[in-house]
Amino acid sequence: MIGLVALTVIGAYVSGRMADGLFEARLKQVLQESARSTQQAQTTFDSSTATTGPDVQRLREDVASAQRTGGSDRREVFLLRAPGQQGGDMFIPGAASDQALVPLVSRELRLATAEGGQHWQSVAIPRDNGGVSPGVMVGQDVTVPVDGTYQLFFLYSFQSEQNQLDFLQRTLGLAAVALVVLLGSMTWLVTRQTVRPVRRAAEVAERLADGHLSERMPEKGEDEMATLARSFNEMADSLQDQIHRMEELSTLQRRFVSDVSHELRTPLTTIRMAGEVIHASRADFDPAAKRSAELLQTQLDRFEDLLADLLEISRFDAGAAVLDAEGRDVRDVVIQAVDHASPLAERRHAWLHVDVPEERCVADIDPRRVERILRNLLVNAVEHAEGSTVEVTVGADAHAVAVTVRDRGVGMTPDEAAHVFDRFWRADPARARTTGGTGLGLAISLEDAHLHGGWLEAWGRPGRGASFRLTLPRRAGIRLSTSPLPLQPVESPITGSLRIVARPHNDPAALPDIGSDHLDTTLSDDERQEVR
């Protein structure tokens, strides 16, 4: 497009320069010719001996006739009496070679000529076919014996120059069209030769991204594109080797974790039995031995939890995890998970605030896995709530059921929220764990959610707390598009639902005023039945 515009501008400039050159050359020629012809006519008038009217008339006719063909080509001649002469303008038969063209001598040109010197003016000469031809009218004063001052005008046609210019412009236009076609063809050819390897490289890159690691670009010739193909293939080979090594390492790692986890079960069982015997007899020990027995029991619990998590991760990695789905009311599972987390909340002086709808929220779920997800989320929220309220909200629509767990603790950044489900990842490695977590809970929870075909998402802001949202399809095989609950917390309370607040048994006065329409409880069996 830019080349076409540039070519048009250059063509217009060249055409204008040619027109100016032809006009200026022809104008210079006619001015010289008219000056010579005027001088010749004046010489003829000066050398004439005519004194009578008929003789002067004959002299004027002879001069006009002679000057009509006195130039390089045919021209029209007009001998007109100068303005201001007594008797007015006097047109002598034969003094105008073509009476029909006399009006082309404009008043402006006659007045300018009367001031002396040579003057010219561009005119349009009528043609027999109704068109016009470009021309120039040149005038100069002459003195006629006895009669006084006259103005001698020469009319030159520039049609020949116009024909030349038209021919040159047509030739230039055809050359421009041919050049455009040639440049377009060359551009198309070069682009095709250049873009084809690039397009091929893009296709190969897409295939590599899809996992077809054996895809390569064809290497032909020794030009830049061939160099690009070789470099691309070398990069693909390196990537393939790296990926294969990483896959082998990952396979070895998963196998190692699985083997170690299984191998540790037998000695752990023996240690557990011995530890329980020691723990049961701790009352007979001195204080130091008694404390050691209690610590041994606690660490055995953590070790057993870690081993169980490692075995579960191994099953996910091996693709051996199976979903045992059944139709269950998600509200029941939520209450069970809250009941499990209540002792921890009591120890941490945190509140568990549960908001469930009055309608049943039945979905095809594996209760064990969903409860494990919720327990992990609740334990994580209580640990980071720093004594504030942990809000658990249940919502449902026609296609999905969702549960959000929100705390108002230290929070986390968006970057931390993106890594919170990574295995063994911790936002602050220097922070001590008070609940004995393994660092695999959220990773296992994410795998459990994916096994249901659902989502597990995290949101957090420093100083505002964190929110986790579990979204599960009501029926197996449904593809989720939206969630019934927002991930980012909404501060306004949800109306039309039953709210349950779990609080420490020994601090009833510390419960915040949440209104008479709420039920404050420690999640007893009767109250869980009421939720159902």
Image (cartoon, grey):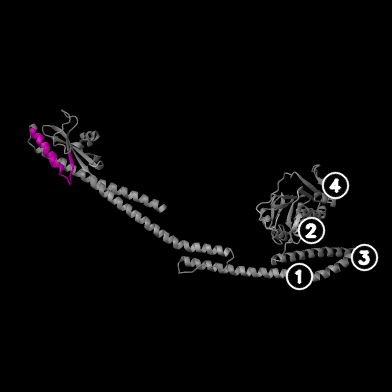
Which of marks 1 and 2 precedes in the sequence? Answer: 1
Task: Determine whether, in the image, residue 163 is placed left or right of residue 41.
Answer: right
Q: Position of residue 127 (x, y in %)?
A: 23, 41
Q: Indicate the amino acid at tag 4.
A: Pro
Which of marks 4 and 1 precedes in the sequence? Answer: 1
**SS for callout 3:** helix
Between label 4 and label 3, give the one nearer the viewer: 4
Picture residue at 60% right of the left edge, 68% below the top: 242
What residue did someone put label 1 on?
262
Question: Is disc 3 in contact with disc 2, using a CB cutoff of under 8 Å?
Answer: no
Label placed on residue 508: 4
Q: Which residues are magenta?
A: 54-77
Which of marks 3 and 1 precedes in the sequence? Answer: 1
Mark 3 → mark 2, Cα distance in angstroms:
28 Å
Mark 1 → mark 3, Cα distance in angstroms:
35 Å
Q: Position of residue 423 (x, y in %)?
A: 70, 62
What residue did someone put label 3 on?
284
